[in-house]
Image: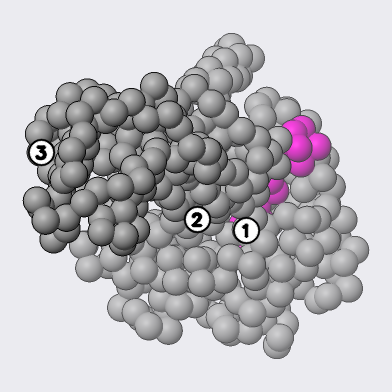
Amino acid sequence: MKNFRKILLSLFISLQIGANYAQDTAAVLFIGNSYTYFNNMPGLLTDIAASFGDHVVHASQTPGGMTFAGHAGNTATYSAINNADWDYVVLQAQSQEPSFPYGQVTDQTLPYAVQLADSSQAISTCSQALFFMTWGRQNGDPQWDSINTFDKMNARLRLAYLRFMDATNASVAPVGVAWKYIRDNHPNINLYNGDGSHPSYSGSYLAACTFYASVFHSSPVGSSFTGSLTADDALALQQAASLCVLDSLETWGLKHHDSLANAAFSFTIDSLNFTAEFQEITEYVDSLLWDFGDGNTSTASNPSHVYLEPGEYTVQLTGYSPCTTVVGTQTLNLEIPFGNVNDPLNHNSDYLLKRITTDTYELETSDENQIDNLQLIDPMGRRLQVNTLLQDQSSIRFQSGKKGPMLVTFTINGQNNVVRIHL
């Protein structure tokens, strides 16, 4: 029966990760012990994420009291690691071991933290080891003076988990930092189970909020999932997690490709020449593909593109990296420089230029003025042939054999004028 259940779990996770979810999806494996297991903290993370439209696929390997050394020697842990291409493998040590004396941690904890992180990241170039920074016990650990209060123990845990991160090119979910924030600022919220060590429901909810911010790089503030908490307590826990994670992403090494990749862009339009200049705004992508919405593409960083016709174009920028694909889309409007037939196109006190038919225009001025030297010029500066249909001193009706944007230049009583049209 155990083997059958493992096969089902493996199949479920593979199907979930292979499905066509939106970009805000994370596959997370939790390796730890009862600190993770209590109150089904991974499930709370899933519910918080779902409240924002995000998706978490998760599995856990959390035997009670397990140390990093215990996990490093456990075949079940490696089976879980190799079961899928995880986006994040969360590593949580036994609650006390990272706070022990420096030399003891160096010999008995750090090597196994490195071993587990290396194994996690070896399964895929895009898998990130994420250490679960736990919290000090409610009254510290009486075994040593250096950790016999919450603040002392919590500080040592913080330093140890940052040390694990630095040694492994991994990252940290700073649950212990958020824990201290709540204790300092909201002492009425009890984060502990009755043993003064394990998390209460509030403590697990705080951990889940911290993981949401760490994995998705988004604030959990405003989540509609509050579980059994009051709305005020849930909001305080959400705010603490958001503050402690998002204000210090660099400190915690939170640079995972999937969550930081971005493909956005800005653009400017040269309405005279129907040209758009594009500027990429990208992060954590290796290559780009522009789709200008008219059948043309480019792989340049900041391309310039000439459109042949006015209209509305959907421009899409796709960014590629070994770990993800991200897309940015905007609508570009090249407005037709005239309204309905016979509506004024452009005019001032000296002249009126209007469209007569699809490709026919008429330039008029008052009887006492004279129009001369009418020319059509294309965007390359070339003069185009003008087909004059009617002409007298104060009006000219004309066409051109060319299509596209162009300039009409002319003089009225010796004064130069320029108008843009699109034939």
Whether residue 193 is situated above or below residue 147 in the rendered picture: above
Query: In the picture, which quadrant includes the C terminus?
Result: top left
Q: CA distance from mark 3 to mark 1?
A: 58 Å
Q: Is residue 147 visible?
A: yes
Disc 3 versus disc 1: nearer the observer: 3
Q: Quadrant of residue 395?
A: top left
Badge number at residue 343: 3
Query: In the structure shown, which secondary structural element does the residue marked by tag 1 occupy?
Result: loop
**297 and 161: which is toward the camera:** 297
Marks 2 and 1, the one that precedes in the sequence: 2
Q: Amino acid at mark 3?
A: Asp
Q: Quadrant of residue 388?
A: top left
Q: Which residue is mark 1?
A: 254
Disc 2 versus disc 3: nearer the observer: 3
Pointer 2 local density, CA inside 10 Å: few below 14, some 14–19, many at least 20 = some
* Discs 2, 1 touching: Cβ within 8 Å: yes
Q: Amino acid at mark 1?
A: Leu
Q: Position of residue 246 (x, y in %)?
A: 50, 66
Marks 3 and 1, the one that precedes in the sequence: 1
Q: Position of residue 16 (x, y in %)?
A: 50, 23
**288 and 5: which is toward the camera:** 288
Residue appearing at x 26%, y 55% in the figure: 412
Q: Which residues are magenta?
A: 121-134
**364 and 20: which is toward the camera:** 364
Badge number at residue 217: 2
